[in-house]
């Protein structure tokens, strides 16, 4: 099994973490982890609960500072706010309460807030919202209340909110948790189409699930170390759970 965790074009990496060490009070979570995501990748980061997947993503996005090592986005330090401007991020458990009175369009529009002073949205912001909803196949639900949507539809709305600023990298942390199988398959098709349109994708998951046939790379985090799993092995075992996969140590 290969242990490569660097993409083919390391000098032009979209995202890179190098020899990252990170610990909580309960112990070390990441032990010298290195990883690169290259332009055009559709990568899944696998790992069991508590393996540090979300922590690695937050370090990679500059939301957490490692004890040692470095993280870069598009060649800039991930701690530099400018480095995150081309990134769309859907964090773990980003569910929307059914009590939220906002419409689908209004939820997506909030993804433009950073570029709209005093929360005033213009024609360009609304056009971008319509375009983002079209990209995820939900333009027909723009005026629907967000709480009326299914779990799978809500996840696509959250992707649209991440896409509304036209990111070059989309990062999703366990976006299909609690979503039924049919919705996962439609969700996988949405991600496939986004990747084909030029969006680089990094998705955190417990297993490759419905996105398996569309992936370009799979990496697994196990006991603080990262290992790359060959696509051949993944495609032989669609639905592979990483708890049953020992991974390799670097």
Image: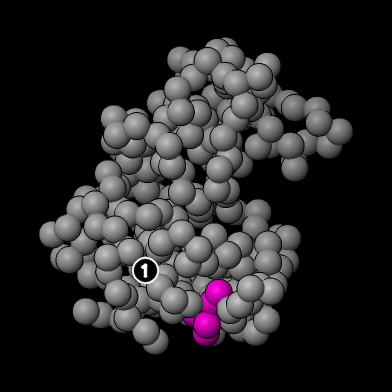
The image shows residue 177 at horizontal and vertical percentages of 43, 42
The image shows residue 249 at horizontal and vertical percentages of 37, 84
Main secondary structure of the magenta stretch = strand
Label 1: few (<14), some or many (≥20) within 10 Å?
Answer: many
The image shows residue 242 at horizontal and vertical percentages of 32, 63
Quadrant of res 46: bottom left
Q: In which quarter of the image is the C terminus?
A: bottom left
Q: Left or right: where does residue 204 sit relative to residue 122?
A: left
Pick the front one: 62 or 54: 54
Disc 1 designates what residue?
A: 220
Using the rendered image of the protein, determine whether residue 40 is visible from the camera's viewpoint. no
> Is the residue 58 above or below the residue 77 in the image?
above
> Is the residue 94 above or below the residue 230 in the image?
above
Farthest left residue in view: 236
Residue at 46%, 49% in the rendered image:
174
Using the rendered image of the protein, determine whether residue 224 is visible from the camera's viewpoint. yes
Judged from the image, the secondary structure of the residue bearing numbered disc 1 is strand
Pick the front one: 159 or 167: 159
Count of all numbered marks drawn on residues in the image: 1
The image shows residue 188 at horizontal and vertical percentages of 32, 41
Pick the front one: 172 or 113: 172
Q: Which stretch did the figure color magenta? A: 29-33
Residue at 21%, 61% in the rendered image:
234
- The colour scheme used here is one colour
Quadrant of res 227: bottom left
Residue at 52%, 15% in the rendered image:
148
Farthest right residue in view: 118
Residue 159 inside the magenta-drawn segment: no
Q: In which quarter of the image is the N terminus?
A: bottom left
């Amino acid at each position: 099994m290969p242990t490569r965790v660097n993409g083919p074009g390391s000098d032009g990496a979209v995202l890179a973490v190098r020899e990252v060490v990170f610990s909580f009070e309960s112990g070390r979570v990441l032990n010298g982890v290195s990883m690169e995501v290259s332009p055009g990748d559709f990568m899944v980061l696998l790992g069991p609960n508590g393996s540090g997947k979300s922590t690695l993503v937050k370090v990679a996005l500059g939301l957490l500072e490692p004890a040692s090592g470095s993280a870069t986005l598009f060649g800039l330090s991930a701690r530099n706010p400018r480095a995150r401007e081309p990134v769309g991020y859907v964090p773990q458990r980003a569910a929307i309460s059914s009590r939220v009175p906002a419409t689908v369009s209004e939820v997506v529009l909030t993804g433009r807030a950073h570029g709209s002073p005093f929360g005033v949205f213009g024609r360009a912001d609304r056009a971008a919202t319509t375009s983002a909803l079209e990209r995820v196949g939900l333009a027909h639900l723009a005026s629907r209340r967000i709480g009326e949507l299914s779990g799978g539809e809500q996840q696509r709305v959250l992707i649209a909110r991440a896409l509304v600023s036209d990111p070059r990298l989309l990062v999703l942390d366990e976006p299909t948790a609690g979503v039924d199988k049919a919705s996962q398959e439609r969700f996988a098709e949405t991600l496939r189409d986004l990747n084909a349109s030029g969006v680089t994708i990094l998705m955190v998951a417990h297993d490759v699930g419905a996105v398996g046939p569309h992936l370009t790379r799979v990496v697994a985090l196990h006991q603080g170390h990262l290992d790359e799993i060959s696509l051949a092995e993944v495609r032989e075992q669609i639905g592979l759970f990483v708890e049953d996969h020992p991974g390799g140590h670097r």
